[in-house]
Image (cartoon, rainbow, N blue to C red):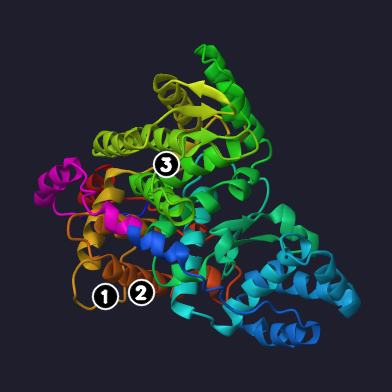
Amino acid sequence: MESNEPRVVAAEDFASQRAARRGKPDISNLEMCIEDARKAALDGDAGPEAPTDYNDLRRRLDACKDKLPPLYQDVAFKPFKAALDSLGQGGFTKLLLQDPSKEGAAGLMLDIAQAILQNGEGYNERATDAFQEVIADTYDGYLSAEDRQGVKPPDNEVVAPLVKWGNPEWGPYTWPVEATASFGVRVAIVNMPPANARRGLLAWSALEHETAGHDILGADDGLQPELKGAVYAALVKRNIGHGLPAYWASRIDETASDIMGILNIGPAAGIGLIGYFRALNAAYGGHPGLRNDGPADDPHPADIVRGYLAASTASLLKFDGAGEWAKVIEAETEKDRTTIRLEGTVITPEEAKLSAQIVADTVVNARMCTLENHALGEIQNWYNHDETIARKLRTVLTTANQVPTRYVCGYYAAHVVAAAVTAALAKGGDVDLIFERMQTILKVMHNSNPSWGPLYVSHPGNITARLAYVPRLAREALEE
C-alpha cells in the first residue's frame, strides 16, 4: 500500500523498527482464525429479505436517494431507478419468474437494489461502512493519481463498488460492471455473507481478491490481455510444460486478483487466503486443507498453487520482512500438499512452485505497454513504512483502550485490515476483540472519505497535495 504522504518518525526509532520488521512472522493463532472463519461460513443468516415487491421497492429507493453521495446517485441510483421504470411492474415480475433461483438477471437486479437499500437505510451501518471503506481503498490504491504517478490516468473511469450483505451460500462474490451495465449501473456490486459482519476476520483479507481484479484490470484498455500474453510467454520461455502456460494464462483474472490483493495489503492477504480456504473447505467439505485438484471448468487456479503463488508474490514485496513471510506462507501451503492435479494432469511440486514463481514475477514486475511501460508492482506495493504503520495499528487493535477517533494522513484501510489479520494470527490474538476494533476504525475512516461526502469525488487519492519540500526526518521515514 504505497503512499506519498510525509510522516515524521524519530530517528532513534529507526533501529527498533527495522528489527521489528525483520522478526519472524507469528502465525501461532492461525487455527483459531480458521475456526472463526469456519463458524462464519456455517452461519445461515441470509440478511434482509429480497425486495420482490415492485411498488414497495420503488418507494424504498426514493427514500434512499438523498442518503447516497452525489457520485453514487449518478453511477448507481439514477440509472437503476430509470431501468426499473422502463421495466415496469410487468417486466420486473417477468424477470423474477424467468430466474426463480435468482442466480441470473433477477439475482443481479435484486443485488443492485439491496446495495442501494442497505447503504441508504443504514442496514448494519458500522459493518457496511467498514466494508465499503476496504473496497474503496483497494480501488483508490490502483487507480488514483496519487499512486499512478508517471502512469496515465485510467482509460475507463472506474468507481469503487457498492457493497451489500446476503447470499451466504455463495460466499464473497462480485457482479462486475459488465453485468451491472445491463441495468445502466456503472459500478460493480460486492457481496459478503451477513455473518461476516460479525465474525470471520479472514474473509476480510479475501476482499482484496474480490475487488482488485476484474474492474481494475479493465480500467486500462488492453491490460488484461497484455498480462495474459506476458504470463504465457514467460512460462513458455522457461520451458514450463504440462499445459501450465495455458493453465495460468486462461486464469489471469483470478490469478492477477490474488497478486494485486497482496500488493495492496501485504502478506496478510496471502496467509489470510490460505486460512480462509481451509475454513471454507472445513465448513463445506469436512477437511480443513487446501485442495490439490484444479478441474478444467474452474476459472480459479487450484488452492495449492494459489498458496505457492501467494508465497512467491510475498517474496517480491518491498519491505524487509518479505522473505520471512514468503517462507511462512510456502511452509503452510506445503502442509496441505498431496498429489497436485491440474486439468487432469499430475504436476510435480517443483513444477507447481516454479510456475507460480514465474507468474508472480511477471504480473508484479513486467512492464506493460498499457501502463506507460510501468509495472503493477510500481503502482502498488507493500513497503517498510506500510509495515511500520501496520505494526503501530496492531497495538491499537489489541489493547482495551478506547479506539482513537482520528488518524494521521497516510493511514489507509489496507493498513487496518493487514494489522487486524496479523494481530489475530499472532500468539494470544483475541480474534473477536480485534475484529470489533477493526470495524470501528474502518467506520471512522469511512466517515471522512470524500467519496461519501457532498463532493463528486471518484478517487479520494486524487485529493492530495504535491509538496515542494519534505523535511529530512519525514523523507527518511518515507524511504524506510
Q: Say above or below: 6 vs 78.
A: above
Check disc 1 and report the residue beneath it: 403
From the top left corner, tell me how far across and down residue 471 is, in percent: 24, 52
Quadrant for residue 305, please give it. Answer: top left
Label 2 residue SS: helix
**Vertical placement of 443 versus 473: above or below?**
below
Residue 197 is drawn in which quadrant? bottom left
Mark in front: 3 vs 1: 3
Kind of residue indicated by mark 1: Val
Q: Which residue is mark 3?
A: 290
Q: Earlier in the sequence, mark 2 or mark 3?
A: 3
Asked if the stretch drawn in magenta spans residue 17, the answer is yes
Which amino acid, by three-letter code, is at mark 2?
Answer: Thr
Q: Secondary structure at mark 1?
A: loop
Extreme left residue here? 12
Identified at 31% across, 73% down, the residue is: 406
Residue 247: x and y, percent? 59, 27
The residue that mark 2 highlights is: 440
Q: Is residue 248 magenta?
A: no
Question: Which residues, given as a range, are shown in magenta?
Answer: 9-34
